[in-house]
Amino acid sequence: MAFTPRFKEKIVKLDNLHSNLTPRLQEFPHLAKDHAALESLLATAHELESRQESVQGELRRINQQRTELEKQGRDLRSRLAAGLRSALGLDNAELAQFGFQPRQPVQRRFESKRDKAERLAREAAKAAAEVQAELALRAAREAKARAAVTTGSEPA
C-alpha cells in the first residue's frame, strides 16, 4: 500500500515539472498559461513552507516556556503551601481556602494495662460462653436423638 507523498515531496515534484518544462515551452505553447499558474503556485507553496518552519520553531519555544512556567508554578505553590502551613498550622481548616488539604488529626487511643486486661477478659468470657452454648446445643441434639431411638420414633 503506497502512502500519499508529503507536502514537501509534492512541491519537489512540481518544482521538477516546472524547471523541466521551462526550456521547452516553445514546443508546447498551449501549456504556457498553466506553466505560469504553476510558477505562482510554487512561489506561494515555498512561502507557506517557510512560514510553517518558523511557526514550528515558535511553537517549540512556546512549549519550552510553558514547561518552564509549569515548573516555576509548582515550585512557588510548594513554597506558598509550606509558608501557609507554617503560619496557620498543619491541621488548620483555613488551608482548604487556599487549595491545600489540612492534615487530619490522628486519634490514637492508648489503652492502659488495666483497660486492656478488662477488654481481654470480656473477650475471653464471650468466647467461653459461645463454646458452652455450642456444647449445650450438641448435648441437646444427642439427647433428643437418644430419646427418639428409645421410643422408636424418628428424630425431628
Image (cartoon, grey):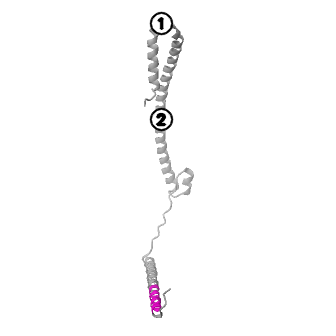
| SS assignment at label 2 | helix
Of 9 and 30, nearer the camera is 30
In x, y percent, where is residue 148? Answer: 47, 90
In which quadrant is the N terminus drawn? top left
**Mark 2 neighbour density, 10 Å: few (under 14) some (14–19) many (20 or more):** few
- Compared to residue 96, the image places residue 123 above or below, namely below
Of 59 and 3, nearer the camera is 3
Range drawn in magenta: 137-149
Count of all numbered marks drawn on residues in the image: 2
Q: Is residue 126 magenta?
A: no
The residue identified by callout 2 is 63
Q: For the residue marked with disc 2, what is the amino acid?
A: Asn
- Compared to residue 112, the image places residue 65 above or below, namely above
| SS assignment at label 1 | loop
Residue found 50% across the figure and 62% down from its top: 105
- Compared to residue 113, the image places residue 106 above or below, namely above
Find residue 91 and name its label: none
Residue found 55% across the figure and 57% down from its top: 93
In x, y percent, where is residue 56? Answer: 47, 29
In x, y percent, where is residue 127? Answer: 44, 80
Q: Main secondary structure of the magenta part?
A: helix
The residue identified by callout 1 is 27
- Compared to residue 133, the image places residue 105 above or below, namely above
Q: Earlier in the sequence, mark 2 or mark 1?
A: 1
What is the CA distance from the residue labelled 2 to the residue labelled 1?
53 Å
Q: For the residue marked with disc 1, what is the amino acid?
A: Glu
